[in-house]
Image (spheres, rainbow, N blue to C red):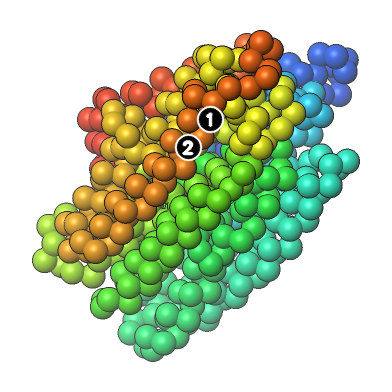
C-alpha cells in the first residue's frame, strides 16, 4: 500500500490529538508545579483547535475506505469524531480545578489517548481495528476511574471497571473471532458476503449475543449495566461525565454499524432482542434512580435509562431494515444520532454542575443540594436547564431527542415500545423534579455561604447551556446533519 498525502485527511483529527498529547507531556515536564493547572486550558483550547482545523478536511459526499480498508472516511464518522473531541475538551475544563486532578499532566494525556481511541471506534471498518480502538478507549478509562489512589471509592471503581471491562472485552473478542471464522474476513463490509447464507441462524444469533455483551457494556445497557453506578460514584466527577457521554456515543455508533453491516437478519430477531433490551434498560434505570440518595449514582441510573431510550431508536432501525415496505429506513438512526448530540451536551452539563458544587461543599448526597439556589443561583439555573432537558421538557435539546426516537418507533409499527418509553419518561421526570425541588424550595443552614465558580467552569457550563438551548430550538440544522449522516451509513 503506497502512501498518498490525501490518505492523512481521514485521520487528521487523530494526528492532531497525538500532537496535542505530546505537547501536554512536554509542558508537564517543564512547567513549575503551581502552573500545571493551565494544562487544562492547553488541552481544552487544543481540542477546540483540532475541531476547527479538522472541519475543512471533512468529507463532502459519500463514504470511502482508506488505510487498507481499516478506516471509514465519511460524514458520519468524521462529524462524530469532532463530537467526542468536543466532549473531551469540556471535560478538561471541568477537571482543571478539581482537587488532585487538574494539575496532573498524566490525567490529560490519558484522556487524550482515550479520545483518540473513540475517534477510531466511530470510523473503524474492520474487526481488528474496531477491537484495538475499543481497547485504546478502555485502558486509559480504567486508570482515570481509579485516579484518586488514596480514595477507597475511587480505587474500588477503577478496579471494578477493569475487571468487568476485561471480562466483556474477552467475550466481545470471542464474538469477533466467530464472525471471522464464519466469513473468512475481518472487513465489516464483506462479512455478510462471506457468510453467504451458509451459516445457520442459530450461529449468527450466538455471535450477535456475544457482540452485544461487549457493546452493551460500553453503553451500560441492562443486564451489562452493573458496573456503572459504582464506577460513576467512585470516579472523579469529570471522569464520570466523560464516561457517560463520549464513551457511550462511540459505543452506540459501533452498535448501529455492526447492526447494519454485519447482521442483516431478514426476520424479527433483531427488533425483538433490541426492544426487550430497550425496555429492560430504561425501566430498570428509572425505577432504581427513584431510590438514590447520592447524586452521582442517580445520574448513573439516569444514564442507563437514557441508553434505553436510544435503544428504542436502534430497535426501530432494525425493524425498518427488516421490512422493505417502509419508506423511511433511516428514521431510527437519525433519531439516535440526534439524541446522542442532545444527550452529550445535556449530561455533560449535569455532571459539570455536580463537579463544581460537590468540589466546594464536599458531598454528593442529595441533601447537600438543599437551598442551592440561594448559595449559587447561576449554578442552580444551569442545573435546572440540564435536568429539564434530561427529563425531555420543551424547548430544550432532550425533548426533541426523545420525540424523534418515539416517533421512529411509532413509524416502525412498534407502538407498545413507544408507549413504554413515554411512561418511563414520566418516571424520570419525577426524580429530576425532586432534585430541583431540593435546589429551589428547601432551605439550608449554609445558605449564607456562596459557591464560587472559576473561569473554566463558567466557560464550560455556559457553552453547554447555549448548546442545549440551540439544539432544542434550532432543530433544522441538527436534524439535517443527523439525517445526512444516517443516510451515508445506511
Number of marks = 2
Tag 1's secondary structure? helix
Determine the image quadrant of residue 414: bottom left
Please give left or right for residue 56 compared with residue 441 in the image: left
- State whether residue 178 is above or below residue 111: below
Labelled disc at residue 480: none
Quadrant housing the C terminus: bottom left
Please give left or right for residue 449 compared with residue 290 in the image: right
- Would residue 464 be seen by someone viewing this image from the given angle? no
Please give left or right for residue 238 compared with residue 56 in the image: right
Determine the image quadrant of residue 332: bottom left
Report the residue marked by disc 1.
Answer: 438
Please give left or right for residue 19 compared with residue 482 in the image: right
Alpha-carbon neighbours of circle 2 within 10 Å: few (<14), some, or many (≥20)?
few
- State whether residue 123 is above or below residue 54: below
Tag 2's secondary structure? helix
Determine the image quadrant of residue 208: bottom left
On the image, the x and y values in percent for residue 17 come to: 62, 32
- Please tell me which residue is depicted at 47% across the width and 19% down the height of the picture: 381
- Please tell me which residue is depicted at 81% across the width and 39% down the height of the picture: 148
From the viewer's side, name the closer residue of 231 and 18. Answer: 231
Labelled disc at residue 434: 2
State the CA–CA distance, disc 1 to disc 2.
7 Å
Amino acid at each position: 500500500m503506497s502512501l498518498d498525502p490525501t490518505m492523512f485527511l481521514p485521520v487528521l483529527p487523530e494526528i492532531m490529538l497525538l500532537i496535542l498529547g505530546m505537547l501536554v507531556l512536554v509542558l508537564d515536564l517543564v512547567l513549575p508545579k503551581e502552573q500545571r493547572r493551565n494544562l487544562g486550558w492547553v488541552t481544552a483550547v487544543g481540542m477546540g483547535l483540532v475541531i476547527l482545523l479538522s472541519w475543512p478536511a471533512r468529507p463532502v459526499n459519500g463514504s470511502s475506505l482508506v488505510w487498507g480498508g481499516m478506516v471509514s472516511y465519511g460524514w458520519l464518522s468524521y462529524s462524530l469524531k469532532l463530537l467526542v473531541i468536543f466532549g473531551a475538551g469540556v471535560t478538561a475544563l471541568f477537571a482543571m480545578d478539581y482537587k488532585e486532578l487538574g494539575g496532573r499532566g498524566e490525567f490529560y494525556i490519558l484522556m487524550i489517548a482515550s479520545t483518540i481511541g473513540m475517534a477510531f471506534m466511530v470510523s473503524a471498518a474492520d474487526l481488528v481495528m474496531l477491537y484495538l480502538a475499543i481497547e485504546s478507549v478502555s485502558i486509559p478509562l480504567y486508570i482515570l476511574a481509579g485516579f484518586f489512589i488514596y480514595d477507597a471509592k475511587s480505587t474500588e471503581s477503577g478496579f471494578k471497571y477493569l475487571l468487568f471491562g476485561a471480562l466483556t472485552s474477552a467475550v466481545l473478542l470471542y464474538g469477533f473471532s466467530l464472525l471471522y471464522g464464519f466469513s473468512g474476513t475481518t472487513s465489516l463490509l464483506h462479512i455478510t458476503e462471506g457468510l453467504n447464507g451458509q451459516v445457520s441462524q442459530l450461529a449468527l444469533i450466538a455471535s450477535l449475543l456475544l457482540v452485544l455483551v461487549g457493546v452493551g457494556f460500553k453503553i451500560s445497557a441492562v443486564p451489562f449495566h452493573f458496573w456503572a453506578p459504582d464506577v460513576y460514584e467512585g470516579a472523579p466527577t469529570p471522569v464520570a461525565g466523560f464516561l457517560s457521554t463520549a464513551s457511550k456515543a462511540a459505543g452506540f455508533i459501533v452498535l448501529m454499524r455492526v447492526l447494519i453491516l454485519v447482521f442483516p437478519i431478514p426476520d424479527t430477531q433483531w427488533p425483538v432482542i433490541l426492544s426487550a433490551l430497550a425496555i429492560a434498560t430504561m425501566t430498570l434505570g428509572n425505577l432504581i434512580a427513584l431510590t438514590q440518595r447520592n447524586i452521582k449514582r442517580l445520574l448513573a441510573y439516569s444514564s442507563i435509562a437514557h441508553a434505553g431510550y436510544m435503544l428504542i431508536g436502534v430497535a426501530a432501525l432494525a425493524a425498518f431494515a427488516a421490512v422493505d415496505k417502509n419508506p423511511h429506513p433511516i428514521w431510527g438512526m437519525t433519531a439516535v444520532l440526534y439524541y446522542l448530540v442532545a444527550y452529550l451536551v445535556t449530561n455533560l452539563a449535569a455532571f459539570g454542575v455536580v463537579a463544581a458544587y460537590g468540589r466546594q461543599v464536599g458531598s454528593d448526597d442529595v441533601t447537600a443540594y438543599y437551598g442551592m439556589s440561594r448559595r449559587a443561583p447561576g449554578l442552580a439555573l444551569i442545573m435546572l436547564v440540564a435536568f429539564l432537558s434530561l427529563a425531555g421538557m420543551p424547548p430544550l435539546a432532550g425533548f426533541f431527542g426523545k420525540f424523534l426516537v418515539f416517533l421512529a418507533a411509532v413509524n416502525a409499527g412498534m407502538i407498545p415500545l413507544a408507549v413504554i418509553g413515554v411512561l418511563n419518561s414520566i418516571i424520570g421526570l419525577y426524580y429530576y423534579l425532586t432534585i430541583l425541588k431540593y435546589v429551589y424550595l428547601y432551605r439550608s443552614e449554609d445558605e449564607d455561604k456562596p459557591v464560587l465558580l472559576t473561569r473554566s467552569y463558567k466557560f464550560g457550563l455556559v457553552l453547554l447551556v447555549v448548546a442545549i438551548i440551540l439544539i432544542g430550538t434550532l432543530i433544522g440544522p441538527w436534524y439535517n446533519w443527523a439525517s445526512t449522516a444516517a443516510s451515508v451509513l445506511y
